[in-house]
Image (cartoon, rainbow, N blue to C red):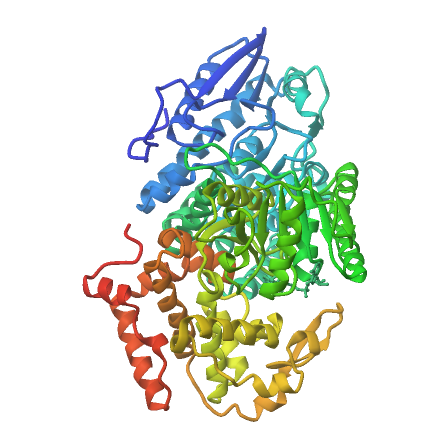
Amino acid sequence: MIDFKGLPQPPDAPAAGSCVRVERPEAGLALVVLDPPHRKIAVFDVPLLRDLEAAIEGLAQDPKLRGLVITGREPLSFAAGADIETISRISDPELANKFVRSGQALFQRIHRLSRGGGGRWLVVAAVGGPVPGGACEIALACDRIVLADHPKSRIGLPEVQLGIIPAWGGTQRLPRRIGVAAALGAILTGKLHVPRQALRMGLVDRLTPPESLVRVASEIAMGRQACPYLGRSGMRKALIDRTALVTKFMANRAREQVLRETRGHYPAPLAVIPLITEAPRRDLEQGLAAEAAAVRPIATGEVARSLLGLFQLSDEAKKTGSLPDGKRAAPIERAAVIGAGIMGGGIAGLMAERGLEVRLRDLDRKQLDAAVVAHQAEIEKKRKRKQLARHEADGALDRLMVTTEAQGFARCQLVLEAVAEKLEVKRAVFRELAAQMDAEAILATNTSSLSVDAIAEGLPNPSRVVGMHFFNPPRKMPLVEIVRGPRTSEEVVRRTARLALDLGKTPVITKDVAGFLVNRVLGPYLDEALRLVGSGVDPDAIDRALVGFGMPMGPCELVDEVGLDIAMHAGASLEKAYGERMRATQILKPLLDGKELGKKTGKGLFTWRPGKSGKPEKDGVNARLARGSTRAMTADDIVDRCVLAMANEAVRCLAEQVVDGPRALDLATVFGTGFAPFRGGVLRYADSRGLAQVVERLERMRSEIEREGERLGRYEPAPLLAELARAGKKLHAA
Ligand code: NAD
């Protein structure tokens, strides 16, 4: 019996025996169905593990057993992996080890079950829908894996993305099954594989339509249908994986790459490398013990806490797509996008790919043509990578209609405008559409700096005007700010958030204040970086310091990426709204006057030249600025100047309730600004520094800057920050 004592239980734990059903559809065959009554989708929490163990123990005593299938309550609903809630509640490394050992022991029991039959009958995992992490690991412990062939099916081990490691045998069984090189790739990227990819790499043994999943798996389990094991059994390949010299080389290469990409901030990918590369040379039990030992420091460490926290936050964000009474908001099926530029073109393409009928309008035919070409290229890329089947790709292309006409929008349930950033132009677009659309149809604006309420002014029914602020590039960036104007109805907010979720984005609801949340906190951060450049600090040194801190790209490069003209415009509108505290530096003005606008013109803070892949590559600091690089500053001081300016503004946003609490704020900073994910968000970072220290540092920087002859209110500690620091409290209450 596995000892589950001391492990956290869900608050709504159901009665023993209720999470797993054993069905006997015919003599000798057993179906083990994961069907916990307290979960919409099964997750491996203590009640499920306990009931699964009881079911397996019962079956192990049955001498008449001739085949076993492990499956979920529906073909496309198997299990979502280990329970994140349980993992994040475990703070004792020994308890983490115990949780891992319990799962390992249970999966080993399953793995050994059919051996008594001498290979004449099998344990088959019949899985479908998302099969991540622990769900994939239980499948790997079975003799064969049958996967439902459906666009919703995805299988893999994404744990390292959450700061943890696949420790229910994942690092041991995956390399045995698909080889060390492929397992390194799969586990380090945390990728979830679509059915055909999974079959090709030997991660699963058979694909079948969802409706025949259990039947086919049963036939295979009973030995009536052949199903060769597709894991690598070739002698040559197995030999390579057992050669220490080769796997050592692979391990070194992987380590170098991980360090290059993560700068050592993330311990989980580094910890899995030796586990994977040594797996084929180890006895399985030994490997499992090594895996469990590696979990101790990692699962309870700061990075895992931050990343698991973010995962939970993005899960919580899904609630924004439901009405306050818990009912899901109605989906949008037919949408229009006005403006086929950088933003509109990308958003319309994404909508079409995700199943919406989209009508994209621009005044300029060339812009429409370019948007269609970009959409075709994107869909073709996904089709080639087998992420979309041919009929899905065809559907995605057919659903995007483009037009220069002003008519034909009557049936659209939502229109998103992404035209020029001018109040009058946006109002005119909405006026024209409101006249032909249903009175309830949603009018959403992608504005980044105008007030949603001002755009709604004068329209019939302003309660249906809402901000839907995507980030550039819209297909890639995970966050969408849903901006609630003072007159926007709750239903419109929720339905727009639901659309963002349906597009695969994470919505955060914000107030209609200048810069909303993300650009408002990004403003002082970028401006500080530019001020440092103005005072003689080398832009390269600034970028290195912040990338070292964990930002995906340095602030100077980001300004070049966004475009100096757009950055200056955004800075000016923040200054207009917030005054002295956001005063924007003018150091970019000479570059702007010289039409050096960043990447798009080949020169900005840096010089850019076309690289081998056709993409611009950095070619040193712009000579105009390089000449002024005279001031040395430590990386820590650079980070504090930029990041604490952001943190201080973030606390003001918190006090003004720009978003719903510190959790949503942190989520938005990570997903919207790329704020170092392993630090869990800007407020969490301030908490980890200690608020008293943050206040002290802000005050010190304020006097330094004053000595340099500037007065800048942005280093005046936000009143809420000062108050919490005095009281010895944190921004995150818990
Ligand atoms: P863009 O200049 O690339 O595209 C605007 C498009 O709108 C052009 O194709 C233009 O022909 C078209 N257009 C202008 N007036 C029109 C009208 N009356 N009817 C139909 N089409 C019209 O601009 P963009 O960068 O895609 O920005 C669009 C909006 O998105 C702006 O409000 C901007 O503030 C916002 N935004 C931009 C970014 C960004 O990084 N580019 C990020 C977030 C939000």
Q: Quadrant of residue 564?
A: bottom right
Image quadrant containing the N terminus: top left
Residue lying furthest top in this view?
27
Q: Residue at x 38, y 37 (%)?
A: 99
Height in image: 133 above or below 360? above
If the picture is divided into quarters, which one holds ligand 1?
bottom right
Q: Residue at x 56, y 38 (%)?
A: 173
> Which is more toward the observer, 176 or 578?
578
> Which is more toward the observer, 525 or 9?
525
Q: Is residue 694 left or right of residue 253?
A: left
Decide if residue 290 is in sight here. Answer: no
Decide if residue 721 is in sight here. Answer: yes
Q: Residue at x 32, y 35 (%)?
A: 7
Horizontal and vertical percent for residue 448?
A: 55, 63
Horizontal and vertical percent for residue 160?
A: 51, 50
Height in image: 654 above or below 172? below
Horizontal and vertical percent for residue 664?
A: 41, 52
Q: Quadrant of residue 104?
A: top left
Horizontal and vertical percent for residue 568?
A: 55, 76
Q: How many marks?
A: 0
Q: Is residue 338 left or right of residue 701?
A: right
> Which is more toward the observer, 170 or 15?
15
Height in image: 725 above or below 481? below
> Which is more toward the observer, 285 or 337?
337
Height in image: 242 above or below 284? below
Q: Is residue 8 left or right of residue 18?
A: left
